[in-house]
Image (cartoon, rainbow, N blue to C red):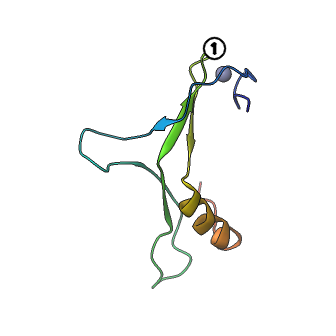
Amino acid sequence: MRCAICGSQRLSPLGDLVSGERWGERLRLRFPRPGVLKPRPEFDADYARACLDCGALLPFLGEEVRRRLDAVADTLRDLPN
Ligand SMILES: [Zn+2]
């Protein structure tokens, strides 16, 4: 596995990724609603590795969340600019 920013292979072990002090707070990837009455698709990034050379943080989805995202990826849109 390589750092997506600098290409280094020196990445930290996988750690929990949290967004605050409260238990269970996670960084969340959100997309626009696919329709008026549809919920906004949201995916928590539960894990991360850090690059030991440039410091980039590489967040990862857990396996269940990754499968859920993969199942609907074709229906997701970019945020409006
Ligand atoms: Zn790097």
| Quadrant of residue 51 within the rendered picture | top right
**Residue at position x 32%, y 48% from top?**
25
Residue corresponding to mark 1: 53
Determine whether, in the image, residue 79 is placed left or right of residue 5.
left
Nearest the viewer among 13 and 8 is 13
Res. 79 visible in picture: no
Amino acid type indicated by mark 1:
Asp
Res. 12 visible in picture: yes
| Residue 39 drawn at (x, y percent) | 45, 76
**Residue at position x 30%, y 39% from top?**
20
Q: Furthest-top residue in view?
A: 53
Determine whether, in the image, residue 40 is placed left or right of residue 4.
left
Nearest the viewer among 74 and 63 is 63
Determine whether, in the image, residue 37 is placed left or right of residue 68.
left
Ligand 1 shown in quarter: top right
- Residue 40, relative to residue 2: is it above or below? below
Determine whether, in the image, residue 70 is placed left or right of residue 43.
right
**Residue at position x 47%, y 70% from top?**
40
**Residue at position x 63%, y 60% from top?**
78
